[in-house]
Amino acid sequence: MASTAEPQSPFAGLANLGRIPELRKRLLYTMGMLLVYRIGAHVPTPGIDPTALSIFFDQQQGTLLGMFNMFSGGALSRLTVFALGIMPYVSASIILQLMTSVVPSLEALKKEGELGRRKINQYTRYGTVLLAIFQGFGLAYGMESMQAGGMNVVVHAGWSFRVMTVITLTAGTAFIMWVGEQITSRGIGNGISMIIFAGIVANLPIALVKTLELARNGDLQPLFVLFLLVMSFAVTAFIIFMERAQRRITVQYAKRQISGRRMVGGENTHLPLKLNTSGVISPIFASSIILFPVTLANFAPWDFMKSIANALSPGQFLYMLIYSVAIIFFCFFYTAIVFNPQETADNLQKYGGFVPGIRPGIRTAEYFDKILTRLTLVGGIYVTAVCLLPEILITSYNVPFYFGGTSMLIVVSVTMDTAAQIQSFLISRQYEGLMQKARIRGRR
């Protein structure tokens, strides 16, 4: 059975945020950098008709472009300098992470510690720029043929527009990548996750205003709007509970004699295995896989491609079936990459640790694999349910429910991680303060 990790909430102690000057500076720095990011998300790229572009993206809801537009906080629908968002960096990071498991040189580089991590980060930056150039050119080339409302999206098509767009979008992505790294090193939280979080939350007020307008015009009943609000809070609480759920495996270390008569070991600890090890990677991968052919089919001139696009559009049975299978598959796939039961069992045996009742070595690895398989299956079902519920509301009831399943997982996970980092910062500073007081008393 999965149980929550700690009884103490990660949001505990956040009332002391302003009492530590260093923490206050980090928070202000993070908010300042996010403000710069949101300002840049409204600086348009030259050569675009904004009216035609807005009409075109209204028709792209439920496609790959619609998902990327959500992650960019609406910057893609306006084709601003930050139109590509941070997705090229996320894609490059995932590709490098997958390659470290299959390329021996990268796997050896990963085990070199801080030096290897810096080298992999450098490769990730190079990959981000290459992906941004490729995606920027594809976006510029594709928009030259786009029309909406009888108007061309691109005012003056040609190589001058393509080169300018590629340079602008690549520079915007590189700047966002720098902003994310600065937030990670000088602010609070993971910078890349905070940028995705800010992009998703930016359009929340617009969705709330649209919902209230529908209720005022009579398109939605007030009780149904109240039901949506209650359901949103219930789903958020459910995600928080499931994201904190984990299986804690008891690990015992044998006593060892070192340095003459000194005895170490003999204590008990726990190995936590999360219920949802893959996090938001599985729904992002699943959405990209299923929406990529749909987006291509929408641009194709053949009727049978249009039929395929309609069958795979959100709300259809085939879409939900393939989406569910893809989420569960990527949950197992990503978990198998990030957690190696054999390696974990070998490390435990190397340092004298063992699971009570389980023979060290291959039996321990099989035990870890058995538990992880069950946890991943439950976690995949949970992620699938969270992702499909908003899709049913959006397609069946035509509700402007902006938070889809993937976006809700991202928002809740980033909020929990940031709150946990703030709490850890407060605890560490309090501990340092107690140590300093103890030194002062000792000197006296």
Image (cartoon, rainbow, N blue to C red):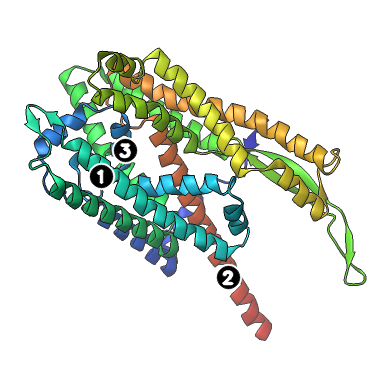
Q: Residue at x 65, y 33 (%)?
A: 2
Task: Compare residues 136 and 237 and report the one nearer the observer.
Answer: 136
What residue is disc 3 on?
68
What residue is disc 2 on?
432
Identify the mark nearer the N-term, 1 or 3.
3
Gap between marks 2 and 3 measured at Cα? 43 Å
Task: Compare residues 231 and 343 and report the one nearer the observer.
Answer: 343
Please identify the quarter of the rendering in which residue 241 is found.
Answer: top right
Badge nearest the viewer, 1 or 3:
1
Please, what is the three-letter code of the amino acid marked with disc 1? Phe
Which type of secondary structure does the marked residue at label 1 adopt? Answer: helix
Category of crowding for the residue at label 1, using alpha-carbon neighbours closer than 10 angstroms: few (below 14), some (14–19), many (at least 20):
many
Please identify the quarter of the rendering in which residue 138 is found.
Answer: top left
Across and down, in percent, residue 83 comes to 25, 45
Identify the mark nearer the N-term, 2 or 3.
3
**Residue 195 visible:** no
Gap between marks 1 and 3 measured at Cα? 16 Å
Badge nearest the viewer, 2 or 3:
3
Across and down, in percent, residue 261 comes to 92, 70
Q: Which mark is residue 137?
A: 1
Tell me if 221 is positioned left or right of 232 in this view.
left
Across and down, in percent, residue 398 comes to 27, 19
Please, what is the three-letter code of the amino acid marked with disc 2? Glu
